[in-house]
Image: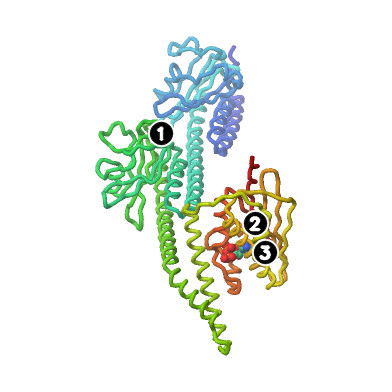
Amino acid sequence: MDNPVPTPEMRVDNIITRLQTTANAFVAITKELDLDMVLQLIADSAKQVANSRYAALGIVDEQGVISFFITSGISKEERELIGALPRGHGLLGLLIKEGQPVRVRDISKDPRRCGFPPNHPPMTSLLGMPVSIEGKIVGDLYLTDKIGKSEFDDEDEWWLNLFARQAANAIINANLYNKARQAQKNAQALAEVVGSLNQFTEPHALFDQISKATCQILGLPAAAVFMLDEQVARFSLQAGIGLKQNSDDDTFLPLKGSVAGEVLEQARTKVVSNLTQLDEIYVPYLASGKLPDSLIVVPIREYGKINGVIEAYSQVARQFTPDEIALLEAFAVKASLALEKANLFHQKEEFLSMTAHDLRAPLSAIKMSSGLLAANLPEDFPPLLSQLVENITRNSERLDNLMEDLLDLNRLENGRVHLNLERCEAGELINAAVNSLNPLFEEKSQLLTYTTNSHKCWIVVDRKRMDQILVNLLSNAHKYTPTGGKVTVALDTSESSVVIKVSDNGPGIPPKEQNLIFDRYYRRPVHEQESKISGTGLGLPITRNLVNLHEGKIWVESTPGSGTTFFVQLSIAPFET
Ligand code: ADP
């Protein structure tokens, strides 16, 4: 039965209560920015304001199909039992299609209904309101089962209309917030991948990283980098992810008939959303064996001139949003800079190693001559001049070592060093290195000791290279530890590995520099300034490369002011049968 007709005082009271509830609801939904939460709050608040048993909010996609559905007044279990989302036919469809409010006294008797799905709780009265943003319907908000009355009235409709408008604003805000959050995430992702590019100084490793990062940025399965070969007028593949292997056709792209060619000609990004609509276009096959359906191609530039492209592929036809395009273009600018840097680095290294190579012959002649001169000086030769001869010998020796280190590191980094592996006894190798360097330590009144927890321990190593590792670490300990200091070599063995520790009680290395010291040319600023401790910053990079070549591990632990320990871990040789 309907409630009795309210008196004017009751109506005023009712309006005030509704106004308060509505105002509270508006504050709540505009304060929240997470889209899911906003939608739930809208449904909950609408139900409360209109005093209905149930409320629901459906969001439709571009095709007008309900893609998102929030309910209020139905338990989670009940929702699960109902199952699929409403199809948007019947009364709900009407709301979306016609954009007009719908008010029904008894759903089951309305000719426009198309029935509830199984397990749906029975519902009688209904009031529905389209939710539109800028004249476009984005969803529908509806209430069912007016509490205390048999149907919704004009006043309810007026309130719900007001509510739907506010709901639309809250949805716009939440969407904007989500967009801003996504843009921030994109910027963060971009910063991370760009940071990762700067670690690479070798162009091919960089090409690989650019392809990987492209997939990561756009969430796509495949990407490739092609560089322009002007002499033969085509692009050639440098690196690819998610592409079919070993297909020669995919290694090159002609300038005519490829999207990359168009990018070069028009000097701008090209997007193809549906490749199947184009005739004859060169694109590589994906790992799935199929051609991609969509791709985006952005230019790579060297000193402002296009010299390559990054291509990103989608297996299925899709659009690329302006945000995605802008993101990839921003990435391509950073990738271009990283490539310029890597190319310069590569050229510098080539130049250095060529120079080092060419300088070695005349340097050997100087070394030999000064050696002969020193050995044959007349007895009455003035001491000052003898000192000069000694200087020539010592410095040409240092220069020769520097050249050797430069060439050695280049060979190591280019994979041109091969190990001469043999079974060696670890203690014996350490003893040899310690004995050869002992006189040097004595000159500086330093105490060099060797301790071990085992008798004999066999490792498979290149004897010469292992000696180089030990001598590098010991020479550093000697060089950086002050006069009278202590240096200890210790050998710890376990079942599967040996750990050689070289410890000193020198100045130590601050934590933030402990990784940097393994980089090429890195010298601690304090040592850079002190000319009395000379060095090149090549010793540790060579040592690390050598340890890696032995499939071992090297690391450092150090406390500034107390000393430094370098650790080298190597596998134990299997027992000989
Ligand atoms: P170099 O000794 O020629 O400078 P390295 O590559 O061997 O080059 O070492 C890099 C830097 O690491 C050194 O310049 C020094 O600052 C630091 N370092 C290496 N070993 C030690 C050590 N035992 N104690 C303190 N600092 C060290």
Distance from disc 3 to disc 1, alpha carbons, whole Å, reads 57 Å
Q: Residue at x 68, y 67 (%)?
A: 438
576 or 365: nearer the viewer: 576
- Residue tagged by mark 2? 429
Q: Judge whether 19 appears above or below 554 on screen.
A: above
Determine whether label 3 and label 1 are within 8 Å by CB: no
Q: Does 532 sit left or right of 285 as displayed?
A: right
- Residue tagged by mark 3? 435
Which is nearer the N-term, disc 1 or disc 2? 1
In the image, the residue with mark 3 has its CB under 8 Å from the nearest atom of ligand 1: no
Determine whether label 2 and label 3 are within 8 Å by CB: no
In the image, the residue with mark 1 has its CB under 8 Å from the nearest atom of ligand 1: no
Circle 2: element type: helix
Residue type indicated by callout 3 = Asn
Locate residue 476: give its quadrant.
Answer: bottom right
Distance from disc 1 to disc 2, alpha carbons, whole Å, reads 49 Å
Q: Does 78 sit left or right of 237 as displayed?
A: right
Q: Does 535 sit left or right of 204 as displayed?
A: right
Circle 1: element type: loop
Q: Residue 497, how many percent across, how many down?
A: 66, 46
Residue type indicated by callout 2 = Leu
Determine whether label 1 and label 2 are within 8 Å by CB: no
Single out the mark in the foreground, 3 or 1.
3
Q: Count neighbours of disc 1 (C-alpha within 10 A) and say few if under 14, some if 14 to 19, many if 20 or more.
A: some
- Residue tagged by mark 1? 287
Residue type indicated by callout 1 = Ala
Q: Judge whether 375 appears above or below 418 on screen.
A: below
Q: Does 256 sit left or right of 478 as displayed?
A: left
Q: Residue 45, how many percent across, how many down?
A: 58, 29
507 or 260: nearer the viewer: 507
Q: Residue 344, how many percent across, how many down?
A: 41, 60
